[in-house]
Structures are given as C-alpha cells and as structure tokens.
Image (cartoon, rainbow, N blue to C red):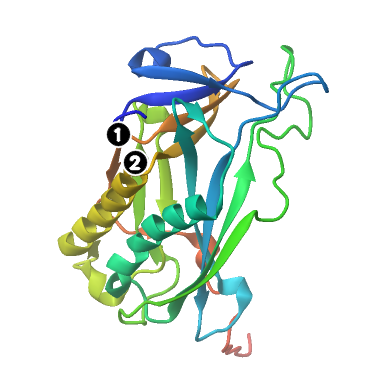
Amino acid sequence: MPLPWTKIAWKTRDTIVSGVTWLLLDRIEEMNGTPSDDQGDPADYWMKFQYRISDIVSQDTADDQVVSFNVVNHTNGIIDPTWNDDDFGWVEAALTGIFLDTADRYSGRLTLTDVKAYAQSFNAIPPEGGIPNGYNDIVASGGPLWARTLNVPFVGASNMAPQVCSSVTEETPSRRHWGRFYLPTLAAGALANGRVGTGTVDALANATSNAYNELFASDFQPVVVSTRANKGKVVHALQGVTGVRCDDVPDIIRRRRFKNALYHKILPVA
C-alpha cells in the first residue's frame, strides 16, 4: 500500500494524461470507468460515506445537514471492489471519530443520526467534440450499499444560526483540485471575535488528520474526485489526500439556512 499522505492518483483508462498537474504526482494508477460496451471490464468504484445530522429542535427533515467523504479501498496496489461489513465498519469508526472528538464544537441543537455508504464510479468519457447534454461524470449510485444508525449528540451552545460553519480543506498536489467538506453548525463558544477560535481550528484539523491516518493504516485512502482539467477538458481521476487544513474564517453555507420560518411579523404598508 502507499505510504500515508502519498501523492497518488487513480485515473480511468480513457483519461489522457497531459499538463503539468500529473508531474506533481509520485504515482499514477489506472482504474476502470464504465465500459462503453458490454465487452469491457466492469467499472472500479469507491465509496461515498454520507453522514446525516438532524436538528432535534426544529425536527424538520429539510433542516438536516450532510457531511460526505470519498474513500478508496486500496489493496495490493489496486482498487479493491470487495467491500465487506468489516471494511465499512473500519471506515465508519474512523470517520465518526471526527465528530466524537469535536462534539463540543457544534451546536447542541444537532445530533449525528446515521451514515450511509454509496458506491461511486465514473461514466465513460464522451468522444471528442463536446460534452453532450445531460452527461454525468459519475454514475447514479441508487440506494446505499451499507448503512448504520448513530446517536452522537453535539453538546455546544445552540444559539448559532445553522449556516455558520467551518470547513476542512483536503489538499492534493494540485491546488486547483483540492477538496473540501463542511462541518456541522458551530457552537457559539467555537467563535472568538467573529473568527473560529484557534482551539477549535486545531481540534477540527487534528480530528480529521487522526481519522485519515486510521484509514491509511487499514489500506483505505481518502480521495478527492476530479472531473475537469486543462480548461474544461473531461478527466476522471481520484487524487489521494496529501494534507488537511482548517482556518479561522467561518463559512456561510446558505443551503443550511432554516427552510421554514416559525415566526412572521407583517405591518401595513402606507
């Protein structure tokens, strides 16, 4: 297996390597995209682990928050499609540790309620001449292959607006292809003078780094999905995460605003 935080990428066989981005990598391995006919090898896939966080005060599913991670099962130098219950359990335990270790940094209105794993694979790259209407880079996965119910209540102060969050950036060798995931609503105590407190920044970065190191130790690789490069050219690749970073600037995630108002006041207009 590659060493932790290795500069590695998996590209589909129909992705043409060009440009300087690929020169930054230590290893480039091939994977199968969806075959263009019935004669091709089946597609290799990775797992998208999707965590759901519920607002126990509003109890409105429209206010649920989602945090997702992409993970490759990497065995003996190749992408391993044979996920079993132990594999899912190892990855879930590592990633759930991020939330367990930082539960006091998030709003106490929220509870981590479940995690689901969806198989993800790349579609065949369209022929040269343009991207057809309706083309999707990633095959629709359908339902989850695995799921687990969780009950991780967050314990920070609960008076922060739901769209006030922090994020963790997943670094890859090419900055244009860095990834990012948004964490749940911050607790009021996580902020200091309008910024995310240094203690919270350290806690979020350390928890993510620890989780990813646990994945590496068990032959799992957190990855960033890349679909475009070189001025919009279609490329299908998974880039290994080489580092994580978090800073003190809060993110405003507009899609996490409360969907329904509980109180209105309308005055006459002259």
Within-10-Å neighbours for mark 2: few <14, some 14–19, many 20+? many
Q: The disc labelled 2 sits on which kind of residue?
A: Phe
The reply to whether residue 248 is visible in this rendering is no
Residue 122 relative to residue 18: left or right:
right
The tag on residue 125 is none
At x 52% / y 75%, what residue is drawn? 54
Helix, strand or loop at disc 2? helix
Q: As displayed, is residue 132 above or below residue 188?
A: above
Q: As displayed, is residue 235 above or below residue 181?
A: above
Quadrant assignment, res 245: top left
Image quarter of the N terminus:
top left
At x 73% / y 20%, what residue is drawn? 126
Q: Nearer the viewer, residue 79 or 104?
A: 79
Quadrant assignment, res 165: bottom left
Q: As displayed, is residue 152 above or below residue 266?
A: above
Q: The disc labelled 1 sits on which kind of residue?
A: Trp
At x 22% / y 57%, what residue is drawn? 201
At x 19% / y 56%, what residue is drawn? 202
Residue 97 percent across, percent down from the top left: 34, 62
Residue marked by disc 1 = 5
Q: As displayed, is residue 229 above or below residue 89?
A: above
Residue marked by disc 2 = 216
Residue 2 percent across, percent down from the top left: 34, 28
Image quarter of the C terminus:
bottom right
- Whether the residues at callouts 1 and 2 have beta carbons within 8 Å, the answer is yes
Residue 232 percent across, percent down from the top left: 58, 22
